[in-house]
């Protein structure tokens, strides 16, 4: 942990609430006639960083018949979340899926350039040539790869962050003197009302605050912190995540954040962010 004060103490007790593990559902591999070609799953997500110019996304294709080489036709279409067809110029997809003799898996590489708009979902719909691929209705001959390139951010200045989850020992006597107060760099997404506090609790771990586009009847904006990693380790329990919802008013975000690890929850604490200006909401 690398919080920006010398002596930092946990303000809350580590009352761990254990939760059940999540288990991914894996698609079945069907033993089909002919080549028995199928995608391993019907969907896949790919999040790309904003600063890279090109990225490659790998998609696995399976077959049940491994004797001999095979080349299966592959086509693709790009649509948005409302199923409108989008230009496919930012994507390159091979025209075939090629298996060598004895291979039961092949990899299709989708190349994505930097022309796609950050902050937007692109759904790349891959389709195997059914005349070559399928012999069973159970085969997965279509797959949707959802591609999201991260927002670009611009620094808007330095803000003040007050944490009650962590408290500070300012005089070095081993006792808590009050909430942890930090000067922090604040960035704003160029494409949305999202604020990012750089290296908030630890270097290398930014925390994002999503602000609603419209205020409520009292002029307040709803703020959401989606579950995200905020610390590499907390009290030996490993990666620590924060999540919560609160309000932005007069340039101040007040939000209770829950701090969780794989074993459970440390509970919630009231955190406050003073933005560099009164309000950057547009």
Image (cartoon, grey):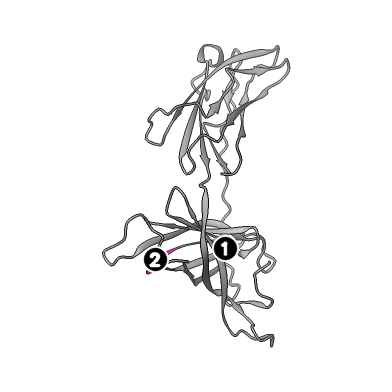
Q: Is residue 164 magenta?
A: no
- For the stretch drawn in magenta, the main secondary structure is strand
Give the image location of residue 7, x and y in percent.
Answer: 68, 78
The quadrant in which residue 167 appears is bottom right
The single residue placed furthest to the left in the displayed view is 217
Q: Nearer the viewer, residue 158 or 256?
A: 158
Residue at (60, 37) in percent of width and height? 53
Residue at (38, 31) in percent of width and height? 83
Give the image location of residue 112, x and y in percent.
Answer: 57, 32
Q: Nearer the viewer, residue 137 or 266?
A: 266
Residue placed under numbered mark 2 in the picture: 247
Q: Image height check: is 93 above or below 193?
A: above
The quadrant in which residue 170 appears is bottom right
Residue placed under numbered mark 1 in the picture: 260
Q: Image height check: is 107 above or below 201?
A: above
Q: Residues within 10 Å of mark 1 (few under 14, many from 20)?
A: many
Q: Nearer the viewer, mark 2 or mark 1?
A: 2
SS for callout 2? strand
Count all numbered tags in the image, as a single digit. 2
Give the image location of residue 27, x and y in percent.
Answer: 56, 33
Q: Is residue 246 magenta?
A: yes
Q: Residues within 10 Å of mark 2 (few under 14, many from 20)?
A: some
Q: CA distance from mark 2 to mark 1?
A: 21 Å
Identify the image quadrant of the N terminus.
bottom right
């Amino acid at each position: 942990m690398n919080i920006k004060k010398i002596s930092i103490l946990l303000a809350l007790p580590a009352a761990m609430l254990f939760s059940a593990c999540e288990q991914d559902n894996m698609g079945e591999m069907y033993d089909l006639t002919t080549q028995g070609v199928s995608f391993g799953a019907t969907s896949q997500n790919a999040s790309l960083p904003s600063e890279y110019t090109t990225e490659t996304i790998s998609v696995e294709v399976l077959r049940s018949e491994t004797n001999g080489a095979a080349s299966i036709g592959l086509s693709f279409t790009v649509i948005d979340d409302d199923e409108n067809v989008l230009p496919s110029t930012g994507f390159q997809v091979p025209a075939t899926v090629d298996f060598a003799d004895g291979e039961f898996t092949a990899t299709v590489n989708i190349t994505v350039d930097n022309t796609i708009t950050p902050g937007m979902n692109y759904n790349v719909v891959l389709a195997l040539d059914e005349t070559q691929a399928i012999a069973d209705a159970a085969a997965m001959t279509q797959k949707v790869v959802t591609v999201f390139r991260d927002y670009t951010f611009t620094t808007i200045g330095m803000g003040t962050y007050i944490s009650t989850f962590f408290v500070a020992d300012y005089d070095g006597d081993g006792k808590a003197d009050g909430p942890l107060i930090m000067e922090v760099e604040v960035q704003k997404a160029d494409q949305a009302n999202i604020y990012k506090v750089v290296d908030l609790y630890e270097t290398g771990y930014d925390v994002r605050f999503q602000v609603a586009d419209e205020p409520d009847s009292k002029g307040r904006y709803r703020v959401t912190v989606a579950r995200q990693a905020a610390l590499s380790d907390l009290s030996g329990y490993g990666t620590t995540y924060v999540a919560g919802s609160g309000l932005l008013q007069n340039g101040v975000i007040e939000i209770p954040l829950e701090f969780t690890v794989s074993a459970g929850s440390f509970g919630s604490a009231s955190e406050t962010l003073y933005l560099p200006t009164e309000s950057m909401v547009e």
